[in-house]
Image (cartoon, rainbow, N blue to C red):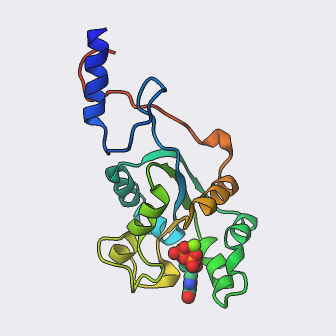
Amino acid sequence: MGRFFERASLRLLLRPWSAPLRAGSGGPTWPRERTLVAVKPDGVQRRLVGDVIQRFERRGFRLVGMKMLQVPESVLAEHYQDLQGKPFYPALIRYMSSGPVVAMVWEGHNVVRTSRAMIGDTDSSEAAPGTIRGDFSTHVSRNVVHASDSVEGAQREIQLWFQSSELLSWADVDHHSAAPV
Ligand code: IDP
Ligand code: MG
């Protein structure tokens, strides 16, 4: 029993970020806000996938789904349906079809808002240094990464890009300790 509490409190100390804990479930639980992040074809070609993943991991978010895919045009048409009337729409679809994309679902407290701050302004020339677009891109038409812009949009996009069986809920296990589990 004492050992259990020791291990539980050690786990609390090692939590990578300070999310509020919800009482009553017998232990800490993670908030379920999720967002879709995708490394676009230019990001994959330029070997930036690892850097993007590292930023989200270091921030403390939890990866719950990931795949590399050539995105079907039908998915892109639905994903960018609000932009269909824009003059750059055909070029946007060509860009997003030009090679594989790495799509991810990240989970955590305020992940939608925080990931938008992490990727930076849509127009890379306006994106602040330190953001993904601000560090790796100079032009809006090759801006490396996508992240959903609202909680509702994220839910719609995750359903569009992922089957529910491709998303995993996983619990923290203390792999920092050498003690046998
Ligand atoms: P977001 O990706 O920051 O959410 P949106 O306005 O949703 O920005 O636009 C979707 C994508 O369309 C952008 O990430 C970018 O790839 C492309 N895009 C937006 N505006 C322009 C433009 O003026 N010229 C070329 N491409 C654009
Ligand atoms: Mg958008």
Please determine whether, in this image, residue 69 is positioned above or below residue 89.
Answer: above
The residue lying furthest to the right in this view is: 74
Q: Is residue 117 left or right of residue 154?
A: left
The residue lying furthest to the bottom in this view is: 87
Q: Is residue 109 left or right of residue 18?
A: right
Residue at the image position 54 percent from the left and 67 percent from the top: 149
Residue at the image position 35 percent from the left and 48 percent from the top: 60
Q: How many marks?
A: 0
Residue 39: x and y, percent?
49, 63
Which quadrant of the figure has residue 101? bottom right
Residue 43 appears in the figure: yes
The residue lying furthest to the front in this view is: 24
Write down which quadrant ligand 1 falls in: bottom right
Camera-nearest residue between 138 and 181: 181
Residue 55: x and y, percent?
35, 57
The residue lying furthest to the top in this view is: 1
Please determine whether, in this image, residue 85 is positioned above or below residue 16.
Answer: below
Residue 111: x and y, percent?
46, 56
Quadrant housing the C terminus: top left
Q: Is residue 62 left or right of residue 7?
A: right
Camera-nearest residue between 144 and 45: 144
Q: Is residue 129 left or right of residue 41?
A: left
Please determine whether, in this image, residue 106 is positioned above or below residue 86.
Answer: above
Residue at the image position 62 percent from the left and 63 percent from the top: 153
Quadrant housing the N terminus: top left
Residue 119: x and y, percent?
42, 69
Residue 103 appears in the figure: no
